[in-house]
Amino acid sequence: MHDPVEQAAASWALRHPLDPSERQALDAWLAQDRRHAGALLRAQAALSAIDRAIDRALVPELAAELAGAAPEPAAPRPTRRWMLMGVGGAVAASIAGVLGWSQLMGARVTTARGEIRRLPLADGSIATIDTSSALRVVLADDSRRIALDKGQAFFQVAKDRKRPFIVDAGIAQARALGTAFSVRRTEDGVQVAVTEGIVGVWAGDESGAMTILQAGQFATFRRGDPAPVTGTAPAEIERSLAWRSGEIALENETLGSAVAQFNRYNRQQLILADPNLASERLVGLFRLDDPAAFAETLAVSHPIKVAVTPDEIRLSRKKIGSP
């Protein structure tokens, strides 16, 4: 690809998802020339074809299963950047009409603190979106894409062999078809956990091979680590997803961890006035939107004193001999 416009479009496509400053710069680039929007659309469409080619190169067996065909012999591993620069405008004919920039970026969905939203998608899939999360949805003719900018979502994916379901969470990506899994993106990293079916996960910068996860398995990606940490923990995964029902399930969890989870959902914050309380172990099922009831239970079952204000619930250790 020697056309500078096509090269610039490929560069923008590969930088997705964009932060606010990058999005402003992209808007300015699109406004410079009418050709830019079309070039960007071609680059985005090329990435869909490239992702499928990478999947086939990395995991032939999985790609064959998703496509309903016999596995192909393994090929040398390509990269998205190399392939995109080679595809150029050859896929332009696959785009019907000209889409606006807002359509290309997809519908943006956000949740406020304490909000849990169940979002049916047009393809029959369902996304359950956790508190303080943001994602974008693009349902195209050849793929279904979710860009998870922050937070967590649980996906129940409708089967569609012609359109892979891909979640982009920055440093990690996941691909599934006819399955159920969660993706959580934080400042520390990304975790993918599978409750049904099979999900392929790989680093967002294409620095490693695809990892296949089955039901009850998880993969945790940390920035800078060469490979994800994986494991099998079906019971722990189910407990971690109790938020879908507005609950928090504790099984020998620390009080510090429980407080952090409650505070993600509530404006009235739990405060550990005595840091030594953080290591106390807890068991129980509680409503995420009722930290006061949680504190009351603590006061009965542990030597903990509770002080409540409209903004805080302070937890401190009871002094010996105090009621």
Image (cartoon, helix red, strand yellow):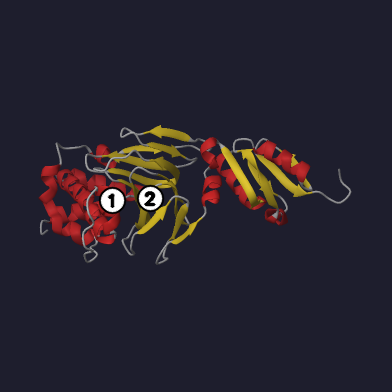
Specify few, some or many for label 1: CA neighbours under 10 Å numbering under 14, 14-19, or 20 or more. Answer: few
Camera-side residue: 19 or 44? 44
Residue named by callout 2? 198
Residue most extreme to the front = 70
* Residue at image coords 20%, 54%: 10
Q: Amino acid at mark 2?
A: Ile
Where is residue 66 drawn, in percent x and y? 28, 48
Q: Is residue 170 visible?
A: no
Image position of 23 (left or right of 217): left
Q: Is residue 102 left or right of residue 220?
A: left
Residue at the far right: name it.
Answer: 321
Q: Is the residue 202 above or below the residue 285 in the image?
A: below
Instruction: Residue 147: tell me if it is visible.
Output: yes
Query: What's under tag 1, amino acid-wise?
Result: Glu
Identify the mark nearer the N-term, 1 or 2.
Answer: 1
Q: Is residue 106 above or below residue 13?
A: above
Q: Nearer the viewer, residue 270 or 65?
A: 65
Residue 308 appears at what percent x and percent y?
72, 38
Give the residue drawn at x 19%, y 45%: 41
Count of marks overlaid on the render: 2
Mark 1 sits on what residue?
A: 65
Crowdedness near tag 2: few (<14), some (14–19) or many (≥20) residues, C-alpha within 10 Å: many
Tag 1 near tag 2, CB within 8 Å: yes
Cα separation, mark 1 vs mark 2, equals 11 Å
Q: Secondary structure at mark 2?
A: strand
Q: Split into 4 quadrants, where in the image is the N terminus? A: bottom left
User: On the rendered image, what quadrant is the C terminus found in?
Assistant: top right
Q: Front-most of 47 and 308? A: 47
